[in-house]
Image (tube, rainbow, N blue to C red):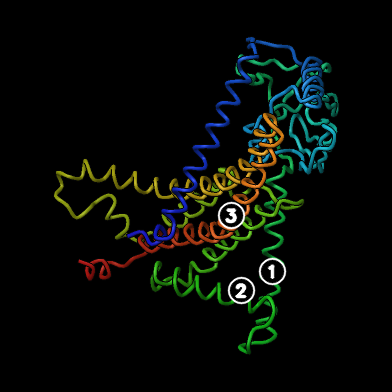
Amino acid sequence: MMPENKGLPVFQRIQFLFLLIIFTLFSFQNVRANGHETASDSVSVANSEHHANHEANHEGAHGEEAFNPGKMILDHVKDAHDWHIMDINGHAVSVPLPVILYDNGLHFFSSSKFEHGHATVESNGNFYKLHNGHIFKTDASGELQLNEKGEALNDKPLDLSITKNVFALLLGAALLLIIFLSVAKSYKKRGTSAPKGLQSLLEPLILFMKDEVIKPSVGKHYAKFLPLLLTIFFFIFINNLMGLIPIFPFGANLTGNIAVTMVLAVIVFIVVNFSGNKHYWKHIFMPDVPVGLWVLLIPIEILGVVLKPFVLMLRLFANITAGHIIILGFFSLIFIFGTKNVVAGYGSAVFSVAFTLFMSVLELLVAFLQAYVFTLLASLYIGSATEEHHHAEEHH
């Protein structure tokens, strides 16, 4: 039985329906846009790209260019070298972030020098240009060679920049330290007396995770893994909540970034397999079945070892990203219908805002549920790796 699925089926069906509607709209918009475009195998885009963007802004100001919801949503959920705040009269307002490149030495400069991808930046004799969220090496003219899919073929330097997600990661880590160092100080000062303030808010949550999730799942060795599992839970929970606040310095899709969820999953994978006892490894490589079945069963067991962290990675990534896409998709409906008819735009605004509020409330629940589920599954995996042999016999 999978306890994490009891409260989720209805919400997952709602998410699937909304995603189906939104992606259908995106496909319609992209097909319509592609009908007016021609592709080329290799294009020089030093000045033509800037000219095309200028014309796009000009056409958008006169209402001639259709609103592209797919591009808008992807720009908000993916990582970036600056923190976009809003657009005023067709001009983007954003907070620049530090760019750190390693290319025959370190290069430091502000992302504002890229002018949202329109300008070429010179650093110590090297030239760089921002294209589709990635930094590429160019010549002094800023020329990029693109293939028929619009992908740049230029070399890329090693990018160590403080991007939006990196900034959100550092901010989340700082908040974790501030919160729990404060709580630890309160415990040290007050001892076992009644908790107050932030301590009273977090203590029930900590005790719930410890007594109802981690201890039953891991077993008698739970204390050894308690700090790690609580850190994972609160890291995911706090960053999920931060991602729901649509104002700077919050709103980054950190836990919806598959690189972040992959690192969390790899940490769990390492802990599980390095903590596994001899009975855990015997069950994988010498299962208690006839020897003739080992050829079939051992590969399945090894595949299961790899798939467990893979499931952790995808579950968190997919659920958080889907929530952001759905909320932004409802906002997009206002502009999609508004370009057709002003009355339809105002009418859809009521519907869109109502469902956005509804989804935002659900996302608050999902922010906790996904942190809870990730920690629960990690605890179960650790428990299965450290379970003692006589416990397994009692189950049989």
Return the residue found at the far front: 343
Depicted 328 relative to depicted 168: above or below: above
Identity of the amino acid at label 1? Ile
Q: Is residue 275 visible to the viewer in this orientation of the structure?
A: no
Mark identifier at residue 179: 1
Give the mark nearer the N terminus: 2 vs 3: 2
Q: Is residue 328 left or right of residue 273?
A: right
In percent of width and height, residue 114 lies at: 82, 30
**How far apart are the alpha carbons under marks 2 and 3?**
26 Å
Q: Please provide percent x and percent y for residue 37.
A: 65, 14
Q: Amino acid at mark 2?
A: Leu
In which quadrant of the rendered image does the C terminus lie? bottom left
Quarter of image, res 82:
top right
Q: Are marks 2 and 1 in contact (CB under 8 Å)?
A: yes
Mark 2 Cα-neighbour bin, 10 Å: few <14, some 14–19, many ≥20: some
Q: Residue at x 65, y 14 (%)?
A: 36
